[in-house]
Image: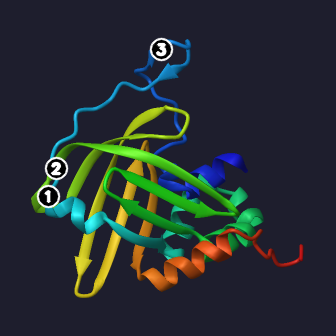
């Protein structure tokens, strides 16, 4: 279940696999090497803001990842998705889910402006880093952000500040799970 929470969390998909290239700091702890960041300009600006999971798309992705276990976990997954809130600011992503806030930093390593695609190194709070991608899709007034790493995907829809605050507040409470209230 911990892996599921991390998968749902940003960018959890971007922080749940250990880094392969690490260096030790003076305390002997492993720390990810810093990536040299490039300017993503307007592509990064499209990513900055408030986001919430696209429930239908995320359920499909999670069914692929969980296989037979998806049906058993469906009530919990739906409750988590309904209250999850993500905030992207320059160089940082924060995910609010199940009463916890997970924050990761990112450094952009490559930009494909034509595809609205960013390749980045994401470093979680433990200093573990890995490469991931973000694709921003804008169709009319609908903005979607797809974050992917190692075959795991998180699909988010843009939301306003009031919806973000509502979800953030709800995420601070344990989810109401049908049958377990």
Q: Quadrant of residue 34?
A: top left
Give the quadrant of residue 45.
bottom left
As measured in the structure, the alpha-carbon distance from the residue carrying label 3 to the one carrying label 2 is 29 Å
| Residue 51, quarter of the rendered image | bottom left
In percent of width and height, residue 20 lies at: 44, 23
Q: How many numbered dots are placed on residues in this image?
A: 3
- The C terminus, quarter of image: bottom right
Considering depth in this image, is 14 or 64 the residue closer to the camera? 14
**Residue corresponding to mark 2:** 111
Indicate the secondary structure of the residue bearing disc 1.
loop
Separation (CA) of disc 1 from disc 3: 32 Å
Q: 6 above or below 116?
A: above
Percent position of residue 161, x then y: 44, 80
Q: 3 left or right of 10?
A: right
Q: Residue, x 44% and y 65% (percent of image)?
A: 87
Q: Residue at x 47, y 14 (%)?
A: 24
The vertical placement of 39 against 125, above or below, is below
Q: Farthest residue in the front direction?
A: 26
- Horizontal side, residue 117 vs residue 55: left or right: left
> Who comes first in sequence, dot 3 or dot 2?
3
Front position in the image: 43 or 101: 101
The answer to whether the residue labelled 1 contacts the one labelled 2, judged by CB atoms less than 8 Å apart, is yes
Residue underneath mark 1: 41
Q: Of label 1 and label 2, which has the lower sequence position?
A: 1
Tell me the crowding category of disc 1: few under 14, some 14 to 19, or many 20 or more residues within 10 angstroms, Cα based.
Answer: few
For label 2, the SS is strand
- Asked if residue 165 lies left or right of residue 3, the reply is left
* Residue 36 in picture, x, y percent from top left: 22, 33
Which residue is at a point 31% across and 56% down the rendered structure image? Answer: 90
Which numbered tag is attached to residue 24? 3
Comparing marks 1 and 2, which lies closer to the viewer? 1
> What residue sits 27% from the left and 87% below the top?
141
């Amino acid at each position: 279940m911990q892996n599921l929470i991390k998968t749902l969390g940003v960018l959890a998909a971007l922080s749940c696999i250990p880094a392969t290239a690490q260096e030790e700091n003076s305390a002997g702890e492993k720390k990810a090497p810093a990536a040299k960041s490039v300017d993503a300009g307007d592509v990064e600006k499209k990513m900055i803001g408030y986001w919430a999971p696209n429930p239908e798309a995320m359920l499909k992705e999670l069914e692929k990842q969980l296989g037979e276990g998806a049906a058993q976990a469906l009530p919990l997954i739906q409750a988590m998705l309904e209250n999850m809130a993500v905030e992207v600011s320059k160089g940082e992503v924060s995910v609010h889910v199940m009463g916890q806030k997970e924050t990761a930093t990112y450094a952009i390593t490559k930009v494909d402006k034509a595809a609205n695609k960013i390749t980045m190194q994401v470093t979680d709070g433990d200093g573990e880093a890995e490469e991931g991608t973000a694709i921003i899709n804008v169709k009319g007034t609908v903005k979607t952000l797809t974050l992917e790493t190692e075959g795991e995907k998180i699909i988010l829809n843009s939301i306003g500040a009031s919806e973000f605050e509502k979800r953030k507040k709800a995420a601070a409470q344990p989810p109401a799970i049908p049958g377990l209230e």
